[in-house]
Amino acid sequence: VVCAWLVYRGIQPSAHGALGFLLFEMTIIFALAVTVVVVQAPKGVLDATEFLPSSSSHGVSGLFRGLVFALLTFCGFDVISTVAEEAKAARTLIPRTTMLALIVFAVFVIAHTWAFSFSKPIAAIAADVQAGKLPVTEIAREYWGRGYFIVILTGLSATIGVFIATSVGASRVVYAIAREGYLPRIFSMVHPGTQAPAGALHLVFGIAIVVGTVTVFILGPYPAYLWWGAASVFFAMLTYLAVNLTNFLFHYRFRRPQFNWFLHGAVPAIGAALDLEVLYKSFFQELLAQSWKEGRSVVVFSVLLALLAVWKAWTTRGAAPGNATLPPSPSLH
């Protein structure tokens, strides 16, 4: 309800709301990490061995298994590009904002993960995960006692903040696809007052409520998060793969005078190769080795949905307006 109240009001309330919730989360998590360091530092257990690949308890396989959710942590930054039509000076600000956000967040995540790795034995953290508990909540319970409820509020605020960003990004993607004629026109309708794509938001919220509720009842809250997280990474990596290929094809076809073999050839090729490597080892190889409930069902669902999307795109090619040449891109404004 809180998320809907913000995103249906337009892009500015959405951005301000997401920022507020995420700043609250970062402040509390920072305080918890400092507490862990202050308590553990006198014991002499803090060191840099956690940064060595040899520290992985499951070797290389463990690294690629963890990489699935490392990628999930970062794939939400795509939202920045989906709101480009609603931004001022998008050509210069969007790329800079994306890179700055990624760098700052990377430093934040790595530093705090390092601190939390010394909060309690790794086996105890793994046991919390197996029991369906949030590890950070259990860490807070141990170090803050009854104050751990603040971390629960942090989890709620983080969920709302991420949901705001996700619903904004997904609705703009649906809006753009519908605008090109590949989805029903109702999803390209913009509210006259708020300028938000209300039809697309109805679809996003409807699907989220239905599938979220169903999977939580089947798997449980935390396992449902892990299941959808893995599925999200699959489609994120497919998107990144498509972006690398499109980078080359777009500049080669439509921007031939500006085509650069390094920026539009070598860089996309390296990016595509890395995407395929991660997709194979972190998604197919690792998830297929897990149980049907935890891993294999994710692969089957994701592949079938991807094939359905390919079939849909193939059967509708040439049917939508503006597919032969670069179409105009009217702003949501």
Image (cartoon, rainbow, N blue to C red):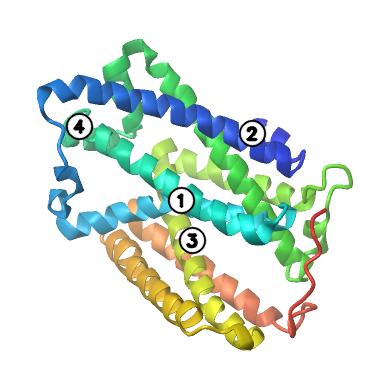
Q: Position of residue 227 (x, y in %)?
A: 41, 50
Front residue (pair 286, 172): 172
Location of residue 30 with respect to 285 vertically, above or below = above
Q: CA distance from mark 3 to mark 4?
A: 31 Å
Q: Could you tell me if residue 189 is visible in this image?
A: yes
Sequence-wise, the earlier of marks 1 and 4 is 1
Q: Look at mark 4 in the image and give the residue it sits on.
A: 118
Callout 4 crowding tier (Cα within 10 Å): few <14, some 14–19, many ≥20: some
Residue at left offset 72%, top offset 40%: 12
The reply, left or right, for residue 254 in relation to residue 152 is: right
Q: CA distance from mark 2 to mark 4?
A: 33 Å
Q: Look at mark 3 in the image and give the residue it sits on.
A: 236
Q: Position of residue 108 (x, y in %)?
A: 38, 40
Q: Look at mark 1 in the image and give the residue it sits on.
A: 102
The reply, left or right, for residue 293 in relation to residue 143 is: right
Q: CA distance from mark 1 to mark 4?
A: 25 Å
Q: Look at mark 2 in the image and give the residue it sits on.
A: 17
Q: Amino acid at mark 4?
A: Phe
Sequence-wise, the earlier of marks 2 and 3 is 2
Q: CA distance from mark 1 to mark 2?
A: 19 Å
